[in-house]
Image: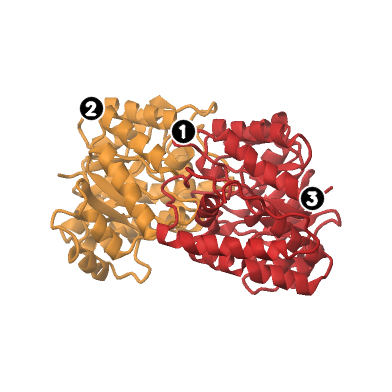
Chain colours: A orange, B red
Amino acid sequence: MTLFRGLSAFPLTPLDEAGEVDEAMLGCFLDRIVAAGADSIGLLGSTGGYAYLTREQRQRTLRVAVERVGGRVPIVVGVGALTTAEAVALARDARSAGADGLLLAPMSYLPLTDEEVFRHFVAVTEAGELPLCIYDNPGTTKFAFTVDLVARLAELPNVAAVKLPLPADGDHAGELARLRARTPDSFAVGYSGDWGAADALLAGCDAWYSVVAGLLPATALALTRAAIQDDFAEMRRLDDAFRPLWDLFRTYGSFRVMYAVADVLGFAGIAPPRPVLPLPSAELGRVAAAVRQIDRANAQDEGSTDGDEHPAG
Amino acid sequence: MTLFRGLSAFPLTPLDEAGEVDEAMLGCFLDRIVAAGADSIGLLGSTGGYAYLTREQRQRTLRVAVERVGGRVPIVVGVGALTTAEAVALARDARSAGADGLLLAPMSYLPLTDEEVFRHFVAVTEAGELPLCIYDNPGTTKFAFTVDLVARLAELPNVAAVKLPLPADGDHAGELARLRARTPDSFAVGYSGDWGAADALLAGCDAWYSVVAGLLPATALALTRAAIQDDFAEMRRLDDAFRPLWDLFRTYGSFRVMYAVADVLGFAGIAPPRPVLPLPSAELGRVAAAVRQIDRANAQDEGSTDGDEHPAG
């Protein structure tokens, strides 16, 4: 199962000016990911803005994606919500629409206890009946998973993976060892946080849940493959090429930056859902330069037959 | 204007087993608050679970409240939402339903910048056209206001007050002085965090945004009046009586505890919206004892003609 292994690409969910899902543009984003050969699509993740969308918008996004992708790449879909009732409904929606797996972040308003999160996951996995990835993203959910809780959840039917934030101490290997010791062999451990992906892959994690791969999947895939094949030189070369973009991610948050990347790539007219604001326009040149540098690195990549296409430029 | 001064009582929003607003029980909660003579009602605050309710549930709650209260006590209503579009819609709903003021917490998924929060508030105040209280609640919103941002917001038409969490250093007087120096004389500064209310009132804040007053308004009001009249002995006596409940608030969070208080008072059959779980049933005895102690203290209060009525016990 590649569902929670290798490169998972997280596309934006483009909305038009009326706030409706821009199906044509979403289709383009998905085509790029499928063409590059990513291992899975992380639809309606944090990058897909799931937290800002209605149930109807999320249903529509998934329907469009399932049709467009046509089974060529598995689709994992975010079903997080502030209430268990809503997350359960979204998990049922995902299953009936044909998703391959679920991503569940414990969104919170009131800070949640471990027991509350555990029971929330039980309800959603029972309703979803699909392989599920625990989405540990304390910067947005205010909830941080302990190894104990991940181990307890990993015993549930269908809980197949965890997506972790980069470890604060940078010790991926240590964290992986602690989790591997407490979870079944089939349980997959992956990381988000694009600027730490190379180190995480080198340390032996199973998956890179990648924001940048939502729009620049070919280069992200080249980096993933180089790391998995222990081609250190190539991996470092590609990671270095991404560095100016990683710097922008750290300054502005990857969500805001990816809207600017879309603009640079010619996908015009979309903006983050307010209150989130787009990048200052003065930074667009920096974003464009960062994207050019990534493209150049990818063009030099012998293993790549073609880079990420630019629809307008 | 008493809207953002004195005691503001924050009721729970009771839902029945089908998830519908229990209008009869909500009416009882509001009757208690009106009968006690609270200065305002903080409807659909964090205690009212606004973050877990749909727009329709929030509309219905406000409609019931406006009708039941009939203008006897001003109603301030929470209009926070994860998107600006939703918060703007809720602010318009509030105005057309007859609310007296708005409470706006900058709910977030992606952490927000000061500029994003500022523009969010501009949009909501323009749509709401009602006096608005900035709802600073970083434990739930992940956003902490600076004095600079409060001062900037206080210049907007209709931004009339701020509701602060208890200061980490316990220095209410210092914080009040810093805010008073940067905001208009008419701008009201109040506090949440019931266990620090006595100190906050003594330090000269304008309002206590009170969770406990949602169900035990008479005793909360007695404490407020004692503090405002500098009756230290009476204030300390009442605050001491509340202490076992404050301890429960700090251990379990006031939201969960208030559902148990409702149960103790005979308002049966309601529970926090999941994933939030009710208190362990083993703690109900402790809650009952805490409520009895508060009742006894209130019965001894010479200034009070009657305490908080118990519908069933």
Q: Label 2's element?
A: loop
Which quadrant: the C terminus of chain A? top left
- For disc 2, the marked residue is A70
Q: Please tell me which of labels 1 and 2 falls first in the chain.
A: 1
Q: Label 1's element?
A: loop
Q: Is residue B140 visible?
A: yes
Q: Amino acid at mark 1?
A: Thr
- For disc 3, the marked residue is B155
State the residue in front, A19 or B102: B102
- For disc 1, the marked residue is A54
Residue under the image location 26 percent in, 67 percent down = A175
Q: Nearer the viewer, mark 3 or mark 1?
A: 1
Residue under the image location 65 percent in, 61 percent down = B295
Asked if the residues shown at circle 1 and circle 2 are in contact, with their CB atoms under 8 angstroms apart, the answer is no
Q: Amino acid at mark 2?
A: Gly
Q: Label 3's element?
A: loop
Q: Chain of mark 3?
A: B
Q: Nearer the viewer, mark 3 or mark 2?
A: 3
Q: Nearer the viewer, mark 1 or mark 2?
A: 1
Residue under the image location 77 percent in, 51 percent down = B4
